[in-house]
């Protein structure tokens, strides 16, 4: 099949009737259709409209599709369409070319060698904004790769590509007024981000230096990309970073930083009017290239340090009566917005643009969770939701042990799919209207090449496509899973090096304190999947029970589960220890300070029966910036035989094993006896995700059970359940 070449433009606004080729229909078979995103309304009628494999959409010669452009259709929703396929022909109706285009994507997805299944579809998207973001600064990806992604995006009705064009990794877009941005700072000494960023030789290199790593888009490249995207009804939002994340700019033009010296800062000098000349010049050239109404100005993670001592910045603060340096950032964003509005464009930025006062008409991209988005929507600002815990595709999508090195996190496709961009508990219906949509971000610090990029983006991007399009009440993981699996070979046929899904088993728990038991549910992202399991810690075999309903645990179980195919175990069995132990729901007292960001649901998180998974962001792990010192009150003097607690290490985001863990017990709550100290066996330089369980066995009489964990690495320590037997 080829890309759409339509003829209906010649008859704008009018029905175009083509002669329909008629085929007789075989006895009606109701086929499984694997559309992503799932349409708002679909009825699979049974039977097929038979076509030959040379079907070219919109080609007058084929004469098989009747296109109708009806501006009154679907309340004018420009992206909606109606598609009717019968055994006699195909009719596609929409209010606009975009709607017709999406109807054609649906047809492309429906196509099978048997023909196109007879369906009746009335469809329109939940959100007007359905986006992917691509960081081309940390690693550069050429225009061919961008176009390949655009092609796949359009197939799944994603309509926005946000390109992160500038950052410390290198400036990636040609600027006529500032040629040094590409001749001097688009290349660097080392491709590997971590080696370069942490290395002694973190330098940019002039274009053409042998062995230099980098690249940039010429203006001609950008025009080609934009044209290619426009033909696929995709808008490209360019991002130019202000005022932070701009280290490369000050190597090319040191006078724009507070010190005036290269390699000293990542922030623009706000007190220097030249910074604003630069900003307006650059944005003018960007506006000329990109038709996008939105222009992204970054706004995230400014260091703000140099502003506190810079005479120019300080003078501006005094002149304008600013209280703190946040207001300097806000000052720059306000001026960016005024400038963009004067050019008929709109400003969008990361949620830090809230700090120091939001520009009056700014749209906010909420990445540090949803809080920035909620706050902005309440203030009447439009919002794109892109929270890190769900929508960061640089996070691991399976057990890190089985995956290429990533920045951290753990977002398998099931978790990504579970995201609802409208925080219904926090916003009124009126405020929710400001949520324009959803976006997934692919930061590329650890993504070196095109293959790796595609591997991280797919199939998770399919989850974003469906979140953005399908009504929330029509979405479920069980329904998405088979369709998503069926689209893996489709992605591969499009040349995408997709992740082919994990053999891991996901375990979820339901603690029932009335029945004093824990239900354990097993799931796989592969479909179909025959899951077999054991509860005694042994490796499951082809004769172990097949999982078909929740496993009920009343005391302790060491569950091991795996997928079997043709009698063979796939991958490594997943292990989950489950204990309905004696500490569950007992009161706990903390002698040390809890960190408010990682409470894991509250004070009894360590005694709720739920075990933490592969990420500290799963709401089960409790985090501390200092030592942990806590006491569990068993209510009365009790015979205790075993106490254990598990800690995590992931040094990328600063999570370390404690130096040691100590167990103490007491009968009266005043006099404590140490029952042992267990040192960590994990090196504090081991960068892989790892866990250590600290288990104390003995025979003690105690009412109070105290766990002390020493923080020795100036980072976080994270623990989950304290198990007491
Ligand atoms: Zn300054």
Image (cartoon, rainbow, N blue to C red):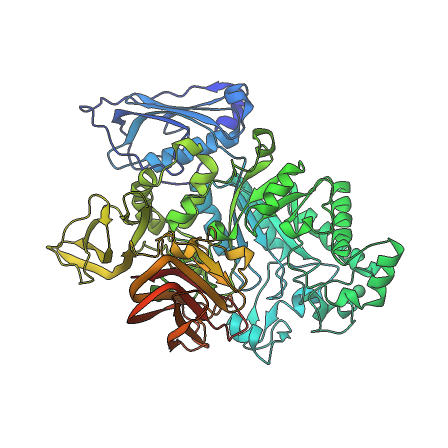
Q: As drawn, is 530 to the left or to the right of 355?
A: left
Q: Is residue 70 visible?
A: no
Q: Residue furthest right?
A: 319
Q: Is residue 313 visible?
A: yes
Residue situated furthest left in the rendering: 543
**Does residue 147 appear to the left or right of 278 in the view shown?**
left
- Among the 4 quarters of the image, the one containing residue 640: bottom left
Is 440 located above or below residue 246 in the figure? above
Q: Position of residue 408 (x, y in %)?
A: 46, 62
Q: Ligand 1 falls in which quarter? A: bottom right
In which quadrant is the C terminus drawn? bottom left
Q: Residue furthest front?
A: 668
**Picture layout, residue 97 above or below residue 652:** above
Residue 173: give x, y in percent of width and height: 63, 58
- Say left or right for 513 vs 364: left
Residue closest to the eye, 513 or 380: 513
Give how far across and how far down residue 679 sits, in percent.
39, 78
Vertical relation: 575 (above or below) 92: below
- Image quarter where the N terminus lies is top left
Give residue 358's position: percent from left, percent from top: 71, 45
Task: Please name the residue shown 82% across and 62% down the image.
Answer: 313
Q: Closer to the camera, 50 or 565?
A: 565
How many numbered marks have been drawn onto this rendered protein structure? 0
Relative vertical location of residue 178 with respect to residue 75 in this rendering, above or below: below
């Amino acid at each position: 099949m080829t890309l759409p070449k339509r003829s209906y433009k010649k008859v704008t606004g009018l029905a175009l009737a083509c002669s329909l080729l008629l085929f007789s229909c075989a006895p009606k078979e109701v086929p499984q259709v694997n559309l992503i995103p799932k349409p708002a309304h679909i009825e699979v009628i049974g039977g097929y409209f038979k076509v030959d494999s040379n079907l070219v959409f919109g080609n007058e010669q084929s004469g098989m599709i009747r296109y109708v452009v009806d501006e009154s259709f679907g309340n004018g929703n420009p992206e909606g369409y109606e598609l009717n396929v019968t055994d006699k022909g195909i009719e596609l109706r929409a209010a606009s070319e975009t709607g017709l285009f999406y109807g054609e994507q649906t047809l492309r997805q429906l196509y099978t060698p048997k023909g196109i299944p007879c369906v009746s579809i009335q469809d329109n998207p939940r959100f007007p904004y359905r986006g992917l973001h691509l960081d081309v600064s940390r690693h550069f990806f050429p225009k061919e790769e961008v176009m390949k992604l655009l092609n796949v995006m359009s197939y799944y009705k994603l309509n926005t590509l946000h390109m992160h064009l500038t950052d410390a990794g290198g400036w990636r877009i040609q600027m006529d007024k500032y040629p040094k941005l590409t001749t001097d700072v688009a290349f660097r000494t080392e491709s590997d981000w971590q080696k370069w960023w942490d290395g002694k030789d973190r330098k940019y290199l002039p274009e053409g230096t042998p062995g230099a790593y980098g690249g940039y888009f010429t203006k001609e490249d950008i025009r080609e990309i934009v044209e290619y995207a426009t033909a696929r009804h995709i808008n490209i939002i360019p991002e130019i970073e202000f005022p932070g994340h701009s280290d490369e700019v000050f190597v090319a033009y040191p006078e724009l930083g507070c010190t005036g010296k290269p390699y000293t800062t990542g922030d623009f000098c706000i007190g220097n009017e030249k910074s604003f000349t630069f900003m307006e010049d650059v944005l003018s050239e960007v506006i000329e290239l990109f038709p996008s109404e939105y222009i992204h100005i970054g706004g995230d993670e400014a260091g703000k340090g140099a502003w506190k001592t810079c005479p120019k910045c300080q003078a501006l603060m005094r002149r304008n009566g600013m209280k703190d340096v946040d207001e300097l950032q806000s000052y720059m964003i306000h001026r960016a917005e005024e400038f963009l509005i004067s050019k008929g464009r709109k400003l969008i930025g990361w949620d830090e643009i809230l700090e120091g006062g939001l520009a009056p008409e700014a749209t906010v991209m909420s990445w540090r969770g949803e809080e920035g988005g909620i706050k902005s929507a309440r203030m009447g600002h439009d919002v794109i939701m892109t929270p890190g815990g769900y929508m960061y595709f640089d996070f691991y999508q399976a057990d890190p042990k089985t995956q290429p090195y990533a920045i951290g996190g753990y977002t398998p496709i099931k978790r990504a799919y579970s995201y609802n961009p409208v925080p219904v508990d926090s916003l009124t219906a009126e405020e929710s209207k400001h949520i324009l949509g959803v976006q997934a971000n692919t930061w590329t610090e650890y993504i070196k090449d095109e293959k790796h990029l595609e591997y991280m983006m797919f199939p998770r991007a399919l989850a974003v496509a469906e979140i953005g399009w399908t009504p929330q009440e029509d979405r479920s993981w069980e329904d998405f899973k088979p369709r998503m699996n069926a689209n893996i070979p489709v992605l591969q046929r499009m040349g995408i090096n997709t992740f082919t899904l994990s053999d891991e088993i996901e375990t979820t728990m339901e603690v029932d304190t009335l029945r004093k038991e824990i239900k354990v549910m097993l799931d796989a992202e592969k479909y179909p999947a025959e899951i077999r399991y054991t509860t005694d810690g042994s490796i499951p075999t082809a004769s172990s029970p097949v999982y078909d309903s929740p496993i009920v645990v009343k005391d302790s179980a060491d569950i091991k589960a795996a997928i079997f195919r043709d009698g063979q175990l796939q991958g490594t069995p997943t292990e989950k220890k489950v204990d309905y132990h004696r500490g569950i729901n007992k009161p706990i007292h903390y002698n040390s300070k809890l960190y408010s960001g990682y409470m894991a649901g509250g004070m009894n998180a360590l005694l709720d029966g739920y075990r933490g998974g592969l990420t500290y962001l799963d709401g089960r792990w409790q985090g501390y910036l200092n030592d942990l010192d806590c006491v569990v009150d068993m209510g009365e003097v009790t015979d205790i035989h075993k106490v254990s607690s598990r800690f995590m290490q992931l040094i990328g985001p600063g999570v370390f094993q404690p130096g040691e863990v100590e167990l103490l017990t007491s009968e009266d709550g005043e006099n404590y006896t140490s029952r042992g100290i267990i040192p960590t066996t994990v090196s504090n330089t081991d960068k892989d995700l790892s866990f250590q369980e600290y288990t104390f066995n003995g025979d003690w009489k105690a009412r109070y059970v105290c766990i002390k964990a020493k923080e020795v690495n100036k980072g976080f320590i994270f623990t989950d359940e304290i198990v007491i037997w």
